[in-house]
Structures are given as structure tokens and as C-alpha cells.
Image (cartoon, rainbow, N blue to C red):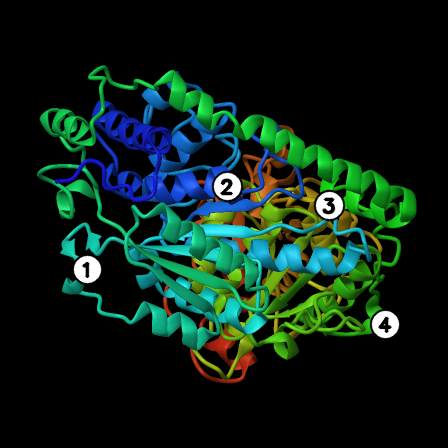
Amino acid sequence: MNSTATTGATRLETLCIDTIRTLAMDAVQKADSGHPGTPMALAPLAYVLWTRHLRHDPKDPRWFDRDRFVLSAGHASMLLYALLFLSGYDLTLEDLEQFRQWESRTPGHPEYGHTPGVETTTGPLGQGLGNSIGFAIAEAHLAALFNRPGHAIIDHHTWFIASDGDLMEGVSHEAASLAGHLRLGKLIGFYDDNQITIEGATDLAYSDDAAGRFQSYGWHVQRVDDGNELDAIESAIQAAKEETERPSLIIVRTHIAWGSPNKQDTAEAHGAPLGAAEVLATKRNLGWQWQEPFTVPEEALSEWRKCVPSGELMRNVWQERFDAYRAAYPGEAAELERRIRADLPENWDADLPVFTAQNGTVATRSASEKVLNAIAKRVPELMGGSADLAPSTRTEIKGSPSFSAQERTGRNLHFGIREHAMGAALSGMSLHGGIIPYGATFLIFSDYMRPSIRLASMMGRHVIYVFTHDSIGLGEDGPTHQPIETLAALRAIPGLIVIRPADSAETVEAWRAAILQRGPVALALTRQKVAFLDRSHYESQAGLARGAYILRDARGDAPQIVLMASGSEVQIAAEAQSRLESDGVRVRLVSAPSLELFAQQPASYRDHLLPRAVPRIAVEAASPLSWYRWVGERGVVLGLERFGASAPYERIYQGLGLTPGRVVDEARTLLGG
């Protein structure tokens, strides 16, 4: 094997490239876990991109006009960690030596907010590629809003590296299709065509014409036949940057574990250490002079660290441009800075509607439409759309154009029937900054988005999911569209706040909470109309901010029983309360729109709402799993452990036993009567 096959590289460039390779081998070997082969294969590409083209400042990783780099192939995390360390980010050699160890800054897959310079959490394949589309949408939108002639203050690229696995996952198909349709010309991706996956050669299961596929999506596609040929990589990147009307994909033929005498081009190099003997043999084959693990030649480090002054210069030049922009356009500059800080505008909630009994019965999706548009007038960074369901989810921002290839200022996004891509893109938009993104579909189809919702929660991103048709109350569409287990599944995601308002007044407060949260929020809204709940003598619906509150308390003495519910089932519990009270039973009615917010409250508040000695009944037209914690040992959950049915919704509730009469019967049984 030729150890000098990095074509077009000087001796120093070869040393810089091989430093990435040896660090990847050593870190994976020490951890006895990881993926060494892909970082070894991609080292030349990464060197060219990071030292010649990527606009970044290692000393200011949050500089707003930096390029965004996404390692969608997150299993190759040691490539990114080596790049961050070598180019001067706040990462040490000791951090690399602690790869995949408890509480280290170099976890098994890149994690946003954990390691400086990591733009998004990647690992589940295809998600990073989908995030990249969101980054590019955000850049294009903000550039159209804020740039002025002679003042291009938002002007950066989004880069990603994807593997065979990324391209196989369905989310990549949806995301790439959307990106091509939107003609996101500042999106440039690399497909690492190493033709190896965990089970073996990719032709075991994969024979796509990737170039033809992306060309059909409207991408500019190039090939680099040898991932070790620096001049070819350089030329391809230059051509991609010059193509401003289409996103670009550069297909790079690489060899996994390049340089390894016995494991190059084998599945063994994908997800396991090379082995101590093979590491030494590979280093010899590369002409590496040092046997000590984690050796970083001073000459190579010095060359890599030139990224520090060059990055500082790029940022300073941009800052000068921004200062000139501020002088010429002070209002626009102040608005952009507010968005970058993620501060809400003053009086952002001044126009929120006030619903009363005079509004009659209103579906919470319809109430949500009014609230969304009231907020959108004062919160211009609110931007989003639906998976081809805006007329049903009621999520169009009135008066705003659609974001498109021709109109970048639009705030209405048409994701098409692509929930997978929508979820991933929303995270990318949030990660970019300057935007509060929302996305809408039917609650049952949140299952398509679960991987991206999970990652948004892991990253603590402010994304708002608007899920309508939230129960069997959607009626005739039947069990395929009626979510049963979905609420429980969403509530099981750590960090996700699920809010299911009971009526129009609670919907106002649900949106208020969603805007004020800094993490992800899922709103679950009804298709069917629900009655307005009279609060003239009860606690304010503002109690929604605490997750649950007393909607109507027992008359006279302490309650004998507590009824609690969320969403449309609060109406059922309210009717049951009235019937029980007519029989002299003291009943407390608790509306619990968000079990996550309620769980965050002090124990004193929770015990106030749900006295320990008082039996409880929870009602929800969904899986009962979420409620057992709150009803206690003496409590009962009236939920559903079967799928729904096709019929008018009133008949479905009756047929499945979710009625006030059943609540009354269960209450009497609990009370011994």
C-alpha cells in the first residue's frame, strides 16, 4: 500500500492530515469503542474544508455569521473532535484522550451544548442532513430580511458530511427533496461514498444511483473519484460555492480506514477499534514517526492553529461591516441583535385574544389560529408551517407570503407531506438562531417526527410543535388517525413540554407558555368544538403555566374526591362534577393541560391540588400510562387501551365508555357508595 497517496499534498499538509488519522485511531483504541475508519478516510476532505473554506472563529464559536458545519455521520465523531482540537477550539488533547468516557467533553456522538463548536447533536442517521436544511432556510430568510445593498451581514454557508447510512434513511430523501425545491444555494454537502456499512459492503442492501437521485431533486452534483486527491476536492468545493442557485452535493469516493494494511475497505473498521497491532502497522504504513499514542507534532499543530488568527480576522472584518450596517440601518441592526439574543419584543403578548362564553363552542385548533396570528404580528421571528395540512391545523400566518425559492422573506413554510424532514429542519432553524420555528401536523403523525423531537429535546431547542386532531374526538377518520398511545409517548420524552388545553381560554395560555419556554413544546389541539369553561368563580386559566390548576373547587368543606383531566375530557369531568355535587358529594375539578409543567412545581403546590388522602379519578381519551403517577394507589384512570373507531365523535366517546355517567359511577365506587 502506498503511504504517500494523498495526491497534491505537501509534506506538511500530509502531516496535518495524518494527525487527524492517528488521533482517531488512538482515541478509539483507548476507549475500546468507536468508529475509526471514517475519520481516517475523510481526513483529507476535512483538512481542505476546515483550513481553506470554512468561515469559523475557534475563539468565538457562536459568531453569528460563521459557516455551519454538520457532521451528519455522527458516528465519525472523532473526526470532528480532532478538527476542533487542532484548529484551536476550547478542547484539549486530554479531552480527546477521554473519548467516550463518563462526563467527558468528547461523547460517542457529537452533542450540541456539550462540546464547543458542535452545531447540532448527530448520530441517528439522516437527522444531521435534515438539520442542515433548517440551517440553510434560516440563513436565506434572515439574509433576505436584514441584508441591504452594500451590507451583506448575513452571508454564510451550511456544510454537511453524510454517510451511506444517512442517504439510506428516509429522512434524507425528504430533506433533500425539500432543499432542492427551495433552491438553497448556500447548502453544500459531501457524501462519503466509502461503500461500507456495519454488515459489510453497501451492495448487500443499497444500489441507489445517488447522483441521479440528487440531480432529480434539483441539486448540483459533482464527483471526486479519489478522496485523497486534494486538488480535486478543492476544485469541487470551489465549483459548489460558485453554484448559488442550487444546493450542492459532492460525492467523494473514499476508503474506510485508509492506510490500514489489513482493515482498509472492510466492515471491521467501521464500528470497532483497529486493534493495537493494526494501529501500529497503520502508523508505519503512513510513515508516522511516533509510536506514543496521541502524539501531535508541533509542526502540524502550528499549521492547524493558523485557523485561530484567520478566524479572528474574518470575524473582525464582519464586525466592521456590521458596525457600518448599524450606522446606516440602526433599527434593523437592533432588531437583528434582539433576535440573536433570543429576547422577545416588548409587549409581545399585548394582542392576545380574550375568549368568553359569547364565543360559544370553539375547537382549540381554531382558537390556536387566532392566538398564533396575534403573536405573529408582534413576534416577527415566529416562522413555520405544516406538512401540507395548514387548512386543517390552522397554522398559516395571515398576510405573510410563503417562503420559497423566489420569496425568502415569507414566514409560511410549505414542508409538503414530509413530517420527517419538517421535524429535522425545525431543529436546524432553531439552532441557527434568529427564528422561533413551529411545525404542524395531526397528532398521530408526530410519530414520523419522533426522532427529531427527541433530539430537539436533548438539545433544549425552542421549537413549537402544533399537533391537531388530538383524540378520538376527530371522529369519522377512524382509528388510523385517532391517537391513543401518542400523548403518553410524547410525554415520555425528557425535556419536552406537552400542553393539551381544555378550551379556547386555555389555548391562549398554552401559546403564551410555548413562547416563553426555552425548550421544545408540543401543543395538542382538538378538531371538534369544545365548550367554553366558565371561570368567573374559579382560579384563572393562567394556572396553566403551573401545568394544572383548580378549575372549580368543592363547595363548602374539603373535597371528598378529585376529578382531573386534560383537553376535551375536562368537559366530561366538569359534567360529572355537577352530577356528583347534586348528590351532595364534594368534588374538586382540576384541569391538567401539562403534566410536565405540573411535575416541575413544588411538592407543596402539587399536594395542595391533589391532597394525599383524597381519592382521584383522571380522564383522558388516550392511553392511561401518563396518569398513574398522579392518581395514586387509590385512584382510577379512565383512558383507552384499545384503538378508536370510525363514527361521529359523540358516538365514539359513548361507545368507549368515556362519559360523565361512567365517571360518576367510578367516583361512587371509590367513595364506597
Of residue 21 and residue 601, the one placed in the foreground of this image is: 21
Tag 4–tag 2 contact (CB < 8 Å): no
Element type where label 1 sits in the image: helix
Q: How many residues crowd mark 3 within 10 Å: few (<14), some (14–19), many (20+)? A: some
Q: Which residue is mark 4?
A: 358
Mark 3 or 4, nearer chain start: 4
Image-quadrant location for residue 18? top left
User: How many angstroms separate mark 1 from mark 2 (CA)?
Assistant: 32 Å
Tag 3–tag 4 contact (CB < 8 Å): no
User: How many angstroms separate mark 4 from mark 2 (CA)?
Assistant: 65 Å
Looking at the picture, which amino acid does disc 2 mark?
Arg
Q: How many residues crowd mark 4 within 10 Å: few (<14), some (14–19), many (20+)? A: few
Residue positioned 27% across, 43% down in the render: 41
Of residue 345 and residue 162, the one placed in the foreground of this image is: 162
Q: Which residue is mark 1?
A: 202
Q: Which residue is mark 3?
A: 543
- Residue 66 at x, y = what percent? 61, 42
User: How many angstroms separate mark 1 from mark 3 (CA)?
Assistant: 55 Å
Q: Which residue is mark 2?
A: 52
Tag 3–tag 2 contact (CB < 8 Å): no
Q: Which mark is residue 55?
A: none
Mark 4 or 1, nearer chain start: 1
Of residue 106 and residue 259, the one placed in the foreground of this image is: 259
Tag nearer the camera, 1 or 3: 1
Element type where label 3 sits in the image: helix
- Residue 242 at x, y = what percent? 56, 60
